[in-house]
């Protein structure tokens, strides 16, 4: 894993903190999951394997329980 810096507005940072807390995930995990989802949506030239958290979140949003 590589480290990077992302600049967020105060509103984005606050919303990120609330969402991470509500989901029981770290802010970094939420950011990585969002990046994976965007890259998959764009269907870039190489396969992007989403993190398990992104898959689980997508399934929950679709009403699947994962069982």
Image: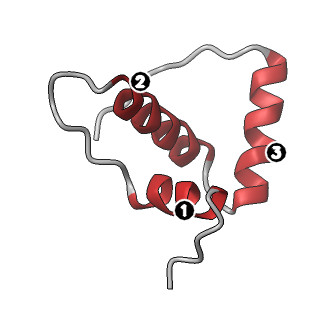
Which of labels 2 and 3 is toward the front? 3
SS at badge 1: helix
Q: Which mark is residue 39?
A: none
Residue 42, image quadrant: top left
Crowd around label 1: few <14 · some 14–19 · many ≥20 (10 Å): few
Q: Height in image: 62 above or below 20?
A: below
Q: In the figure, is residue 33 to the left or right of 8? A: left
Numbered tag placed on residue 59 in the rendering:
1
Q: What residue is at 51 percent from the left and 63 percent from the top?
A: 56
Q: Residue at x 26, y 47 (%)?
A: 49
Q: CA distance from mark 2 to mark 1?
A: 28 Å
Which residue is disc 3 drawn over? 18
The N terminus lies in quadrant: top left
Check disc 2 and report the residue beneath it.
Answer: 4
Tell which circle, 2 or 3, labels the residue nearer the N-terminal end: 2
Kindly state the secondary structure of the residue where label 3 is placed: helix
> What percent of the width, then of the height, locates residue 39?
36, 28
Residue 61 placement (x, y as % from top left): 65, 56
Q: Residue at x 54, y 42 (%)?
A: 28
Q: Is residue 56 above or below residue 67?
A: above
Q: Residues within 10 Å of mark 2 (few under 14, many from 20)?
A: few
């Amino acid at each position: 894993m590589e480290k990077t810096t992302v600049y967020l507005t105060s509103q984005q940072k606050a919303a990120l903190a609330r969402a991470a807390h509500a989901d029981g995930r770290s802010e970094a995990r939420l950011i990585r999951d969002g990046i994976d989802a965007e890259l998959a949506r764009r269907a870039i030239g190489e396969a992007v394997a989403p993190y398990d958290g992104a898959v689980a979140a997508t399934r929950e949003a679709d009403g699947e329980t994962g069982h």
